[in-house]
Image (tube, rainbow, N blue to C red):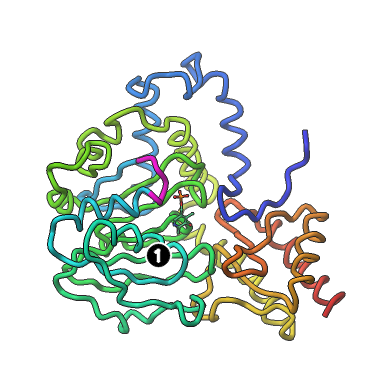
Amino acid sequence: MTERVYNFSPGPAVLPLPVLEQAQRDLLSLPGVGASVMEISHRSKAFDAILTDAQALIRQLLGVPDNYRLVFMQGGAHLQFTLVAQNFLRGTGRTAEYVLTGSWGNAAFKEAQKEGSARAIWDGKQHNYSHLPAFNELKISADAAYLHMTSNETIQGVQFKGEPDTGTVPLVCDSSSDFLSRPIDVRRYGLIYACAQKNAGIAGVTAVLIRDDLLERVPKNLSASLDYANFAKTDSRPNTPPCFAIYILMLVCRWLRDEIGGLEKMAALNTQKAKLLYDVVDSSGGFYRPHARPDCRSLMNVTFRLPSEELEAEFVKDAAQLKLTELKGHRSVGGIRASIYNAMPRAGVEALAQFMGDFAQRKG
Ligand SMILES: *Cc1c(COP(=O)(O)O)cnc(C)c1O
């Protein structure tokens, strides 16, 4: 078998090795079943157990209160951009407010505008999304349909440390790239969505946490496949769900609980990993130029530039020879992006930090 690399891909991204090994062991037959999760009914006892387990683990890890429903949907975070607006904006006569902190917030905003009135109450465009607003800068209207934020902007590498107090306005959050990376206070949110392929599993499933009372606001005439209330009512199975993706999500959550020891521990590890890279950036005498302002730096996606595009290309090429891969930044920011999600082992980050130090010394 080809040796595994340290894969810094922004998504789909690295998975914990024990999860892949477990999936490999179960690939031909789930224990006691005689068939794989890909080959059994989504209404079978065996799949029921997997779905229930995944839900219970996420609830336990995040401390989800009883008045929240957890559903699994398809269509990625992109479909959530649309669904949030269809379920909670369309036909309300209200305005949805968006905090634009990078590419993904903008993408969500664009979809909302197709469904109704939406406006940006903060937009970091003029400084190329290098920093975030302070929460007291956000002037949220008391009658807004909801406030939408992106907890971690995967492309720019800026991450909120908490969440604004939105009062009675439901806070909707795209947590796709930092879901399960740290503890959060779920009670401050109306709805949280996260596609799984960054930090929680593989493409095909999106976890959505919705506060009960919001389900009553869902218009009655929505298509059944686009209706949050219907997903809650049918326990994520209005039709065939992505069984394999839910199974992997369940294994990732088990790994978080049993091998990592929960989200406090995970957050501590993530903080240490990110510090290894930012320390090299900060001590490089300006060779590495961080994209994000220091107080807004992401613990998940570390973004920086080098003195020239030629050096950036060389950096990516030399790193790959050391089996440090997928480091090229997104075209809108340029430079380098090291995505160091939960499953990226500390050893991988250490190897990258070492390489960065050596490279700066050689070329600086
Ligand atoms: C990757 C990502 C998305 C897009 O996810 P899809 O599943 O491809 O639709 C949206 N928001 C954030 C924050 C992301 O990181």
Would you name the residue on which mark 1 appears? Answer: 105
Write down the region rendered in magenta. 73-78
Q: Is residue 170 left or right of residue 268?
A: left
Q: Residue 325, how many percent across, how many down?
A: 72, 54
Query: Which residue is at 50% across, 82% downward?
Result: 127
**Residue type of the residue flagged with mark 1:** Gly
Query: Which residue is at 30% across, 83% downward?
Result: 136
| 75 part of magenta stretch | yes
As helix, strand or loop, the secondary structure at mark 1 comes to helix
Query: Which residue is at 23% across, 42% downward?
Result: 227
Query: Which residue is at 58% across, 55% downward?
Result: 10
Q: Is residue 62 left or right of residue 143?
A: right
Quarter that holds the C terminus:
bottom right
- Can you name the residue that lies furthest to the right here? 362
Q: Is residue 133 left or right of residue 21?
A: left
Q: Residue 200, how many percent across, how many down?
A: 48, 48
Quarter that holds the N terminus:
top right
- Can you name the residue that lies furthest to the front here? 114
| 126 part of magenta stretch | no
Ligand 1 lies under 8 Å from the Cβ of mark 1: no
